[in-house]
Image (spheres, helix red, strand yellow):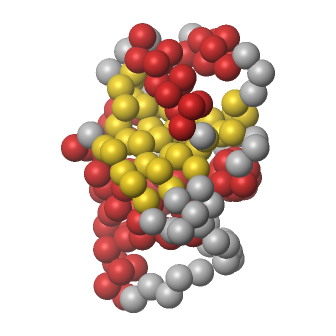
């Protein structure tokens, strides 16, 4: 795990609470809970899903007929979609969800070298900051954010290299 200074830790806590506050009002105002999606072929996706499960939330694997799978999921009107996948999956989900009234809040490319390439709406910038501060632990931090932010987080002992993948958030409305 990357050593973090006290200043970095405090900054990370502030960013996480801002991100949670940014996402929570939209989630409460909509019917349903956020849906967590992941690509089973990605190590980062498996870590995201495993951590969400440790925290009491089930993530949905993107597999099979993804178009039908996403259309069925959207019929339940989740408040938001949080995903860890390949770019192609994000693009497909984003297109289908866009037709149902969802918009992209953030799309972050996590590279093997450990750097990130964010593309965020103004209210999603805090998510990119959180991803940057989380380093190699970003799949777990993203799961914590997806299910309610820092008040649901649990300590995890993890030293893992960064894994290439995309994390993304689509919000209803």
Q: Is residue 74 above or below residue 46?
A: above
Q: Is residue 68 above or below residue 119?
A: above
Residue at x 57%, y 31% (from the top left corner): 88
Q: Is residue 87 above or below residue 17?
A: above
Q: Position of residue 26 (x, y in %)?
A: 35, 32
Q: Quadrant of the C terminus?
A: top left
Q: Is residue 159 above or below residue 71?
A: below
Q: Position of residue 76 (x, y in %)?
A: 57, 15
Residue at x 39%, y 21% (from the top left corner): 102
Q: Looking at the image, which residue sits at the far left?
A: 122
Q: Quadrant of the N terminus?
A: bottom right
Judged left or right of residue 113, residue 59 is right
Residue at x 31%, y 44% (from the top left corner): 120
Judged left or right of residue 46, residue 152 is left
Q: Is residue 21 visible?
A: no
Q: Name the quadrant containing residue 7.
A: bottom left
Q: How many numbered markers are drawn? A: 0
Judged left or right of residue 51, residue 135 is left
Report the front residue among 125 and 154. 125
Report the front residue among 123 and 27. 123
Q: Position of residue 84 (x, y in %)?
A: 59, 44
Q: Position of residue 153 (x, y in %)?
A: 56, 62
Report the front residue among 113 and 147. 113
Residue at x 47%, y 50% (from the top left corner): 109
Q: Is residue 72 visible?
A: yes
């Amino acid at each position: 795990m990357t050593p973090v200074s006290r200043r970095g830790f405090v900054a990370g806590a502030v960013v996480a609470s801002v991100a949670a506050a940014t996402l929570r009002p939209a989630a409460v105002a909509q019917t349903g809970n956020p849906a967590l999606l992941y690509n089973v072929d990605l190590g980062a996706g498996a870590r995201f899903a495993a951590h969400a499960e440790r925290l009491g939330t089930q993530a949905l694997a993107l597999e099979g007929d993804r178009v039908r799978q996403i259309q069925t999921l959207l019929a339940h009107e989740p408040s938001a979609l949080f995903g860890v996948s390949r770019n192609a999956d994000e693009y497909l989900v984003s297109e289908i969800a866009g037709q149902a009234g969802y918009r992209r809040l953030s799309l972050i490319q996590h590279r093997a070298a450990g750097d990130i390439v964010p593309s965020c709406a103004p209210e999603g910038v805090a998510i990119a900051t959180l991803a940057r501060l989380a380093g190699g632990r970003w799949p777990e931090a993203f799961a914590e954010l997806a299910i309610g932010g820092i008040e649901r987080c649990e300590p995890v002992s993890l030293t893992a290299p960064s894994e290439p993948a995309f994390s993304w958030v689509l919000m209803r409305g």
